[in-house]
Image (spheres, rainbow, N blue to C red):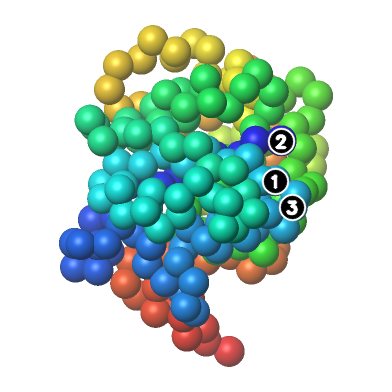
Amino acid sequence: MIAMILAAGRGERMMPLTENTPKPLIKVKGITLIEHSINALKKAGIIDIVINIAYLGEQIKTHLGDGSKFGINITYSDESLGVLETAGGIIKALPLLGDKPFIVINSDVLCDYNLSQLTLPIGALAHLVLIDNPAHNSNGDFSLINTHQVITASRKSFTFSGFGIYHPDFFKNHLNAQGKLPLYPLLKEALASNQLSGEHYQGYWQDIGTPERLELANNPKN
């Protein structure tokens, strides 16, 4: 299986830490965020990885190279002419991702979910790992019924973890999209057609969206 790590964002909420360093190269417990992502994929037996880059992207390429020093194969999708947001970045990288389901993970998320068990159920075009709502997203993103069917957020809601698996057909109606394209509208389309599934994960999860959350990741509270 192929996986994609999303690493093109500017990380504006992490300023001034990201003024001269791309967020994926910020360290948590002495290891860069993107290496945490690589390690999670490699642990799951996934060694073919596409990484999209934009802001200070050359630093990421210099640091990771072709991936051989990590025992993986890295291909880069360059968005230096303009960041395309999540869905737009994935669509640009589709020629590198093949015609089978692929995993996508955010480079600014730490999670101990076992990616080797992430599969796309029959009839679904996308499957999301959902977690309990963190304080900064208390209303959640989606709800679940019948164990794995994703619906619009209701009284019992969950937050999208940033880990998911997608079939290339999930993006087929937007292949000619120009400019930035976020992922959420596409998820809503799949939800409306009952082609979006998910699962609730209750293990460790921490996003590194702000300096405060970086501090929490480096010095977790007991």
> Residue 88's quadrant in the figure?
top left
Q: Tell me the residue at 42%/64% (across/down).
A: 208
Q: Quadrant of the N terminus?
A: top right
Residue 44: mark in rendering: 3
User: Pointer 2: what residue?
Assistant: 1
Do we see residue 74 in this rendering? yes
Q: Is the C-beta separation of discs 1 and 3 under 8 Å? A: yes
> Residue 167's quadrant in the figure?
top right
Q: In terms of sequence position, does the residue under pointer 2 or pointer 3 come before the other?
A: 2
Of all residues, the one furthest to the bottom in this rendering is: 222
User: Pointer 1: what residue?
Assistant: 46
Determine the secondary structure under disc 3: loop
Residue type at numbered disc 2: Met
User: Whole-Å distance between the Cαs marked 2 and 3?
Assistant: 10 Å
Above or below residue 138? Residue 46 is above
Residue type at numbered disc 1: Ile
Determine the secondary structure under disc 1: loop
Do we see residue 142 in this rendering? no
Question: Is residue 165 left or right of 12 when viewed as pictured?
Answer: right
User: Whole-Å distance between the Cαs marked 1 and 2?
Assistant: 6 Å
User: Whole-Å distance between the Cαs marked 1 and 3?
Assistant: 6 Å
Q: Is the C-beta separation of discs 1 and 2 under 8 Å? A: yes
